[in-house]
Image (tube, grey):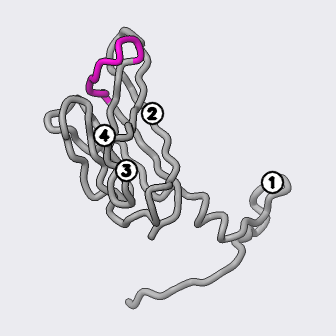
Amino acid sequence: MANGTIAFDTLSTSGQISGTAKSVDSDYLASGSAKCWLSFNGAATPPAIRSSFNVSSLTDNSVSDYTINIDNDMADANFAWSWGVRDGTTEGRGRFMNPRDNKILTASAFEIEFQNDDSNALNEPAIGCVIIHGDLA
């Protein structure tokens, strides 16, 4: 079976959705969708990708320092990102992700560190998640 192309400007429903929003512009779907996401186990040796979309690999640079290698490049390095982390301990300490100025931030790779909120110490997240929004190349 040959693959083809479907072209449309608006996606509409047959009335199964309640409320006022019954259609959405296809440009909104393309622009508003995550272009890359990753869920990984940072405590594993080596860190293990649990699930991902548009990620070719995860590089373990050092303790809690990772490079996400993007499969299909972003248009540039001006994309938006968000993150989440599960500590995996009973302490309930907060964590933050730090893409510092001296870290890789290109259309094809994104380097991050996970740090403890109290001490700023680098430590491996039980589960780290990153989502990237922006335009693909």
Query: On the rendered structure, is 122 left or right of 20?
Result: left
Does 126 sit above or below residue 36?
above
Determine whether label 1 and label 2 are within 8 Å by CB.
Answer: no
Label 2: element kind? strand
Check the image and name the residue furthest to the right.
Answer: 20
Within 10 Å of the Cα at label 4, are there few (<14), some (14-19), or many (20+) other Cα atoms?
Answer: many
Does 41 sit above or below residue 136?
above
The one nearer the camera, 68 or 50, is 68
Query: On the rendered structure, is 71 left or right of 19?
Result: left
Q: Amino acid at mark 1?
A: Ser
Q: Which mark is residue 84?
A: 2
Label 3: element kind? loop
Check the image and name the residue furthest to the front.
Answer: 102
Mark 1 vs mark 4: give the one in front: 4
Where does the image place residue 88, in percent across and percent down from the top left? 33, 20
Q: For the magenta stretch, what is the residue range? A: 117-126
Task: Identify the residue shown where x is 37% and y is 50%.
Answer: 105
Q: CA distance from mark 3 to mark 2?
A: 19 Å
Mark 1 lies on residue = 18
Does 87 sit above or below residue 91?
below
Secondary structure mostly seen in the magenta stretch:
loop
Q: CA distance from mark 2 to mark 4?
A: 11 Å
Where does the image place residue 61, in percent across and percent down from the top left? 19, 40
Q: Quadrant of residue 113?
A: top left
Q: Quadrant of residue 31?
A: bottom right
Mark 4 lies on residue = 40
Q: Which mark is residue 105?
A: 3
* Residue 122: in magenta span: yes
Q: Quadrant of residue 48?
A: top left
